[in-house]
Amino acid sequence: MDKMTRAIELMQDQQLEEAAKLFTEAIDENPKDPIGYINFGNLLVHLNEMERAERFFNRAIELDEEAATAYYGLGNVYYEQETYTKAQKQYLIAIEKGLDEADVHFMLGMTFIHQEYVKLALPYLLRAVELNADDVDIQFQYGLCLAQNGQIEAAERTMNRVLQLEEQHSDAHYNLGVVALHKEEAQTALEHFNKALEINEEHMLAAHAKAQVEQALSEE
């Protein structure tokens, strides 16, 4: 097993110091290989060392302008710094350079979500779902975005898909409760709010919604 592969395994196992040491050795041995800089950049993002990570990703791009994952890594640096327009630019370049994976489409969609451009977010989140239908976070954010775009039935189907993937997802139950209220199904809404609170007793939105529904039902 080469040093790069071993370092990636160590990083996945949270043995970050050992991974950093091997990445450094791999870069020293192959200073013209962009992959080493990209992998070390990913590690630095993990360590929240964003300025250093940015330098490593830029060095990878200097070595290979077609290195799509370097642009993706740079996008993650800017995303973590909440400079979403800069992140968008890098994610789009990564896609243009051929990176067609769920994560990059998801992250691009999320940059639009954070800026409240929910219509612009939708196609990227949809693409992420198409590429990885079993990712809970992707499904959930797609469901939220559908709801924000007024596509209530599609949002309901997606939130039910979230529950298929993760039964104890309190936020999915909360949002299904909101959908039920939209459909004027108060009892179903109450069941979902109760379930959300059963999973997470500190779910303030569910607690507030439950109280409102119970008050409305008592006044009927």
Image (cartoon, rainbow, N blue to C red):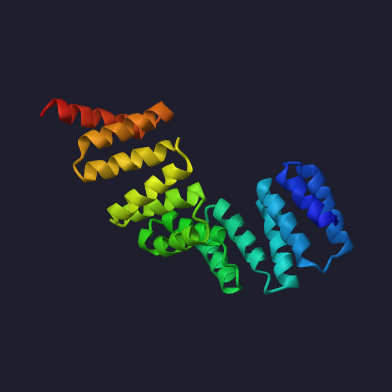
x and y percent of residue 89 in the render?
54, 67
Kindly indicate the quadrant of the structure image that contains residue 195.
Answer: top left
Q: In this rendering, does residue 200 appear at all?
A: no
x and y percent of residue 167 in the render?
45, 37
157 vs 29, left or right, is left
- On-image quarter of the C terminus: top left
- On-image quarter of the N terminus: bottom right
Kindly indicate the quadrant of the structure image that contains residue 181.
Answer: top left
218 vs 74, left or right, is left
Q: Is residue 175 above or below residue 88?
A: above
Residue in the picture at 74% in, 66% down: 59
135 vs 184, left or right, is right
Q: Is 97 or 191 nearer to us in this picture?
A: 191
Residue lying farthest to the left in this orientation: 220
Instruction: Count every numbered label the image shows and give the total.
Output: 0
Q: Is residue 168 above or below residue 60?
A: above
Residue in the picture at 23% in, 31% down: 212
Residue lying farthest to the front in this orientation: 164
135 vs 8, left or right, is left
Kindly indicate the quadrant of the structure image that contains residue 102.
Answer: bottom right
Q: In this rendering, does residue 106 appear at all?
A: yes
x and y percent of residue 133 in the render?
49, 55
Q: Is 24 or 178 nearer to us in this picture?
A: 178
